Amino acid sequence: MIKMKNLVVGSGFSGATIARKIAEELNQKVVVIDAKPHVGGNSYDYFDSNNICIHKYGTHIFHTNSKLVWNFLAKFTKWYTYQHKVKGLLDGQYVPIPFNLNSLYQIFPACIANNLEKCLIEKFGFNKKVPILELRKTKDEDLTFLAEYIYQKIFLEYTLKQWGMKPEEIDASVSERVPIYISRDDRYFQDRYQGIPLEGYTKLISNMLDHPNIGVELSTSFSKDMEYEKLFYTGSIDEFFEYKFGQLPYRSIKLDFLEFSYDKFQEAAVINYPCNYDFTRIGEYKWFLNSQANKTVVSYEYPEQFELGKNERYYPIIKDENRILYNKYLELTKDIPNIHFLGRLGDYKYYDMDKAIERALILFENM
């Protein structure tokens, strides 16, 4: 077997970024392998017969405050400047998510909403983001009322469906991803740079991997028999060590795709259903690139526990006990030189796309 100079396992954003940097800046050969039959990992998308870009593994919206990351990706794609908005079904109304001042006035009578807005601004200030668990700690009677309403109507049931746990049982960093926003800004993200690759994520990553020094082998699983000088592993770290200490827990998603003969199925790209149905949300794909078609495609998301060989790893379950297990695997890496773990699965972190790319860029600079 020929010894490879650099082997990258996984062709998602983490793997594609490190491969491109090595190939382009170090002028070294890189082999990228992926067990899937396509590049892109869980960011993979494709254009269907209606010319709608479908995200096979659920909705992906790129956002970042990092000019470094944005400019790096801009070499491989042009952007559709999409600003993401999400709504949630609360008491029969579709209101902005995260819950903000517009949500407040849509749900409550004006006399109650006016008082709650005043209380929020006096306590926290305007244009501030407040985690639900922090809002619940307030001693103010009116804010306690609001906190319990939001907790029950948005966080509790949704978190139980999404994570199989209550908000208090998961790491605060997870619930803080959807804070209460004391603002009139209906956008889901406030990052400086937001958009969708104009030709899709798959084309973007394919362009990243399009270099004379990069070879790509799909439907190819990693084997300990492979020979390499350096390994960049974006798969699950517990799988690499053959589950020596047990499996790291993940949540997965079952997606149900449906096509309708409508111009639009719903009033936002993503609608959350915290207290209704067994699915958590419905994503509608033609919103992302403003696709013009007589039909539309949506996906219903049903969270479930990850089971080896049955479904895909999506979200690491961030809890103290799982960090301890991950750190046991991390200790093993200290005994094996020239192997780098990265990405959501390699680092066991709930990375957004930009953070996965940033992590790979920093790894390259520090090598």
Image (cartoon, rainbow, N blue to C red):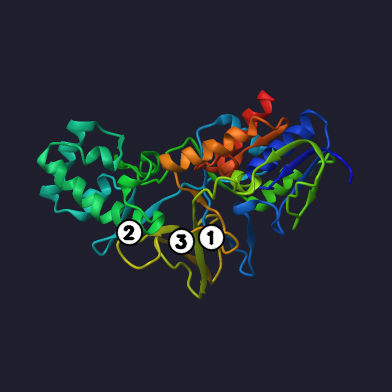
- Mark 3 or 2, which is nearer the eye? 3
The answer to whether residue 268 of the structure is visible from this angle is no
Q: Regarding mark 2 in the picture, which secondary structure is present there?
A: loop
Question: Which residue occupies the foreground of this view, 135 or 326?
Answer: 326
Residue at left 68%, top 47%? 10
Instruction: Describe residue 110's horizontal placement relative to residue 225 as left or right.
Output: left
Query: Which residue occupies the foreground of this view, 157 or 332?
Result: 332
Q: Nearer the viewer, residue 323 or 351?
A: 323
Q: According to the image, label 3 marks what residue?
A: 304
Instruction: Residue type at mark 2: give it.
Output: Pro
- Give the percent coordinates (x, y) of residue 39: 70, 53
Residue drawn at 59 percent across, 63 percent down = 52
Residue 223 spot, x, y in % from top left:
75, 49
In the image, farthest residue toward the front:
244
Which residue position is annotated with label 2? 274
In terms of image quadrants, where is residue 38? bottom right
Of the residues shown, which amino acid type is indicated by label 1?
A: Glu
Crowdedness near tag 2: few (<14), some (14–19) or many (≥20) residues, C-alpha within 10 Å: many
* In the displayed structure image, the side of residue 122 where residue 89 appears, left or right: right
Q: Is residue 77 left or right of residue 320?
A: right
Q: CB atoms at circles 3 and 2 under 8 Å apart?
A: no
